[in-house]
Image (cartoon, rainbow, N blue to C red):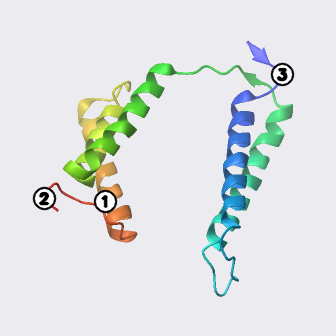
Amino acid sequence: MKTTRDIHDLIGGLLMMAAGLFFAVYGTRYSFGSTARMGPGYFPVVLGGTLAVLGLLVALPAWWRQGAGVTVQWRNLVWCIGSLLLFAWTLQPLGVIAASFLAGLLALVPSAMALRTRLTVCAVVAVLTTLIFPMALQMQLPIWPWN
C-alpha cells in the first residue's frame, strides 16, 4: 500500500535535523573560537549544523516522493535495546572487548546469519571498538576485566 509521502526518509531526515540543531544550539554554550584556533564549541556547532543541513536534504525530497508505510520491527528493537543495556552493565566488570562482543551477539539474535559469521562480526566489532575508544580516543575504559 502506498502513502502520499515517503515516511521513512521524512522521519529520518527530521530526526537528523533535530539532532543536528540540538547539538548546534548546545554547542553555543561554549566559546566558538576560529577555524585556526578552535574552541570547545566549534566542533558541536559545525557538525550539528552539517547534520541539520543533511537532514533537510533527506527530508525535503521525501515530502514529494511516494513510499510505503512505516512498519516497526519490535523484535529487532527489543534485542537492540537489550544489547545496549548489556554493554552498559558489562563494560566495567568485563572490559570493552568482552562487553562489545557480547552486545554484538545479543543484537544479532534476530538475524538469519550463520553462527560463524555472527562470531566474526562480533570479533570485528570488538576489535574496532577497542581501537577507536580506549586507544585512538584515549578514553579511560578497561580493555580486559583485569585492567
Q: Is mark 2 on a helix, strand or loop?
A: loop
Amino acid type, mark 2: Trp
Question: Which of marks 3 and 2 precedes in the sequence?
Answer: 3
Q: In this view, does 11 lie above or below 125?
A: above
Q: In this view, does 34 lie to the left or right of 84?
A: right
Q: Is residue 136 left or right of residue 64?
A: left
x and y percent of residue 67 in the render? Answer: 75, 25
Mark 2 surroundings: few (<14), some (14-19) or many (≥20) residues within 10 A:
few
Q: Residue 120: tell me if it is visible.
A: no
x and y percent of residue 8 in the render? Answer: 69, 30
Q: What element carries label 3?
A: loop
Query: Residue 33 appears in which quarter of the rendering?
Result: bottom right
Mark 1 surroundings: few (<14), some (14-19) or many (≥20) residues within 10 A:
many
Circle on res. 130: 1
Q: Which of marks 1 and 2 is in front?
A: 2
Amino acid type, mark 1: Thr
Residue at image coords 66%, 57%: 23
- Residue at the limit of the structure toward the right, as seen here: 64
Q: Is residue 94 above or below residue 138?
A: above
Q: Residues under labels 2 and 3: Cα distance?
A: 56 Å
The answer to whether the residue labelled 1 contacts the one labelled 2, judged by CB atoms less than 8 Å apart, is: no
Amino acid type, mark 3: Thr
Q: Is residue 39 left or right of residue 6?
A: left
For label 3, the residue is 4
For label 2, the residue is 146
Question: Which of marks 2 and 1 precedes in the sequence?
Answer: 1
Residue at image coords 75%, 35%: 10
x and y percent of residue 95 in the render? Answer: 23, 53
Looking at the rendered image, the quarter that the C terminus falls into is: bottom left
The answer to whether the residue labelled 2 contacts the one labelled 3, judged by CB atoms less than 8 Å apart, is: no
Looking at the rendered image, the quarter that the N terminus falls into is: top right
Residue at image coords 25%, 52%: 92
